Image (cartoon, rainbow, N blue to C red):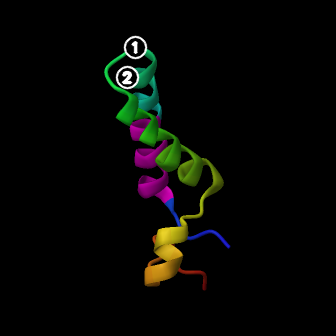
Amino acid sequence: MKNVGGIDRILRIVIGAALIVGALMGYGVWMWIGVVPLVTGLLGTCPAYKLIGLNTCPMKK
């Protein structure tokens, strides 16, 4: 079930990709953490959101 919507999803993809590019350019191994927001943004689901009951997807009527 998707729980990451619109702007949240776009931000995750952009920030995740930027961090991965930084890691590839040698700015630090810690930047590989960008894989997490990239994957959650691409899949549209976040396990942490599920744990705390958060959902940024628009409400269905």
Q: Amino acid at mark 1?
A: Met
Label 2 sits on a secondary structure element that is: helix
Identify the residue position indicated by label 2 in the image: 22
Q: Is residue 52 magenta?
A: no
Q: Quadrant of the N terminus?
A: bottom right
Residue at point 37%, 15% (across, down) = 26
Give the camera-side residue of 28 and 44.
28
Percent position (x, y) of residue 7? 42, 54
In this view, the residue in front, 3 or 49, is 49
The residue that label 1 is drawn on is 25
Q: Residue at x 52, y 41 (%)?
A: 35
Instruction: Report if residue 57 is visible in the image.
Output: no
Is 15 colored magenta in this rendering? yes
- The answer to whether 38 appears left or right of 23 in the picture is right
- For image coordinates 50% across by 48% down, the residue present is 36
Q: Is residue 13 visible?
A: yes
Task: Provide the residue span drawn in magenta.
Answer: 6-16
Q: SS at mark 1?
A: loop
Task: Please state which amino acid type lies under the numbered disc 2.
Answer: Gly
Q: Residue furthest front?
A: 29
Marks 2 and 1 close (CB-CB < 8 Å): yes
The front one of 56 and 36 is 36
Vertical order, 10 against 44 (above or below): above
**Main secondary structure found in the magenta portion:** helix
Instruction: Please state which of residues 58 and 31 is positioned toward the viewer in this rendering.
Output: 31
x and y, in percent, of residue 12 in the image? 44, 48
Q: How far apart, in angstroms, are the residues tagged by discs 2 and 1?
A: 5 Å
User: Residue 37, relative to residue 47: is it above or below?
Assistant: above
